[in-house]
Amino acid sequence: MKKILFVTSEAHPLIKTGGLADVSGSLPKALSELGEDVRIIMPNYQAINRTEEVRYLSTVYVNNYAVNILETRLPGTGVTVWLVDCPEFFNYPGNPYVDEHGKPWANGAERFALFCRVTVEVAMNRSWLDWKPDIVHCNDWQSGLVPALLSLEYSRPAIVFTIHNMAYQGIFPKATYLSLNLPGQLWNPHGIEFHDMLSFLKGGLVYSDRITTVSPTYAKEIQTAEFGYGLEGLLSYRKDFLSGIINGIDSDHWNPETDANIVQTFNHSTLNKKQLNKAALQEKVSLPVDKSIPVFGLISRLVEQKGIDLILECLPEMLTHPLQFVLLGSGNKGFEQRLHNFAESHPDKISITIGYDETLAHLIEAGADIFLMPSRFEPCGLNQIYSQRYGTIPIVRKTGGLADTVIDTVPETLNNNTATGLVFNEANAGTLMEAIKRSLILYNHSKTWKQLQINGMQKDYSWSKSAKQYMTLYSHL
Ligand code: ADP
């Protein structure tokens, strides 16, 4: 049994802005079910959804702040969560990265630097918790100073750093580095300096014993200029220590056989019942209820990464086909407005819901026929996996985790029953539209369609499979 300190800025269901929270809410649980001793450490934000008892454990002093360590449990699991409680930084409304008005925290660097320093105290067993981890498992830039600071410690634990998205790096001016009072020996181009700026992410990439990312394809892509954001050289230099492990999913929460958020539960042998969810979805989003018309779904942050602009370019041509399109998401105001305009002029074909709505997300996965995910890059992606579980055929671009989890429909994969969706190569509207048209043809071949659904529904995306790969990685450290 290994002792693992899991360092994260968000964990479902305590607080969630994206896929990192899903991983942090499920991987520690899966690891502890497999016998590891895992503790999560994260900031004690005001917005945390507190349903379990919280108790005081100890106080540590860093940078003139007295910081309390509180203990709670990840709801619905036996996993211990340590909350880094520093009200001066975290007791404000907003989410981990932006304030209540949606503006990035002006003191973002200070917030997470403090979190990292406290984590180092915990990792070195200097915080009166009487527990020293064998492995510190950091995630994304918010925890990037942990490996950097631990590298200066004698007898430190082993460090794993997981990249969930290279697009977010925690880059700040040199003046911030100076004001944070970080050790001088970290400031060099082989350390946390990045073109005369401070890079939290580099702290993770340079000083960790192992780097992982959330799919094997993304692990290769980030070693290239197109996906590496200037860090491709460092990543390819460290390639022997870099690998990809695909995320699992919470297969209790995303299970069409037991899902309480949908109208009718179903499985691969009762696929005809999926129709009832389709009707409920159409009714819920005020589209004509029609079981024959193919329904395309999309659930996403509305940002360029997700290829929302490609969807906008395709919509005029999509509207010439018999189909419906249901979108749930929020993000870029320009995208939101343009999507709204389409919905207003075509209320019988397009429904746009702006916002974050877990229940509707489940109904879309259960009720749609086809799921669109034309991401420019996608470290892992979850919705294409949920779609497969719910018999909803994903259309994805061949990148990152999408390339690793969706098998394109071609004669060979149809014959050997491995095809689960449609995959296209180039990030442009033309190739996306080709894939959409291909899906419309397949949709009309009901026997083939059903086989695609069954192929996807029978795949194993459970966390225990991925967690075992992390355990193998830990065991080599
Ligand atoms: P990312 O982390 O880049 O946003 P992922 O596909 O890895 O993308 O994970 C996104 C997660 O957030 C999924 O669980 C998805 O269902 C959920 N999600 C995103 N937008 C919404 C929304 N508007 N309403 C409900 N769930 C959403």
Image (cartoon, helix red, strand yellow):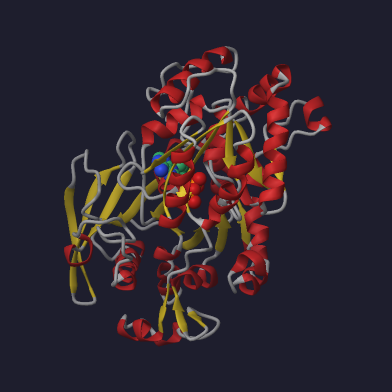
User: Image height check: is 425 above or below 292?
Assistant: below
User: Image height check: is 22 above or below 453?
Assistant: below
Q: Residue furthest front?
A: 345
User: In the rendering, at what x and y percent does residue 412 appear?
Assistant: 83, 31
Q: Say left or right for 304 vs 329.
A: right
User: In the rendering, at what x and y percent does residue 21 appear?
Assistant: 40, 48
Q: Residue at x 54, y 56 (%)?
A: 305
Q: Residue at x 28, y 72 (%)?
A: 107
User: Image height check: is 178 above or below 31?
Assistant: below
User: In the rendering, at what x and y percent does residue 131 appear?
Assistant: 32, 55
Q: Quadrant of the C terminus?
A: bottom right
Q: Residue at x 30, y 84 (%)?
A: 179
Count the numbered circles shown. 0
Q: Nearer the viewer, residue 194 or 399?
A: 399
User: Image height check: is 246 above or below 281?
Assistant: below
Q: Nearer the viewer, residue 14 or 76?
A: 14
The answer to whether residue 36 is visible is: no
The answer to which image quadrant residue 210 occupies is bottom right
Q: Say left or right for 39 vs 207.
A: left
Q: Nearer the viewer, residue 380 or 25?
A: 380
User: In the rendering, at what x and y percent does residue 25 appear?
Assistant: 39, 43
Q: Residue at x 61, y 47 (%)?
A: 374
Q: Nearer the viewer, residue 261 or 90?
A: 261
The answer to whether residue 284 is visible is: yes
Question: Quick check: which quadrant has ligand 1?
Answer: top left
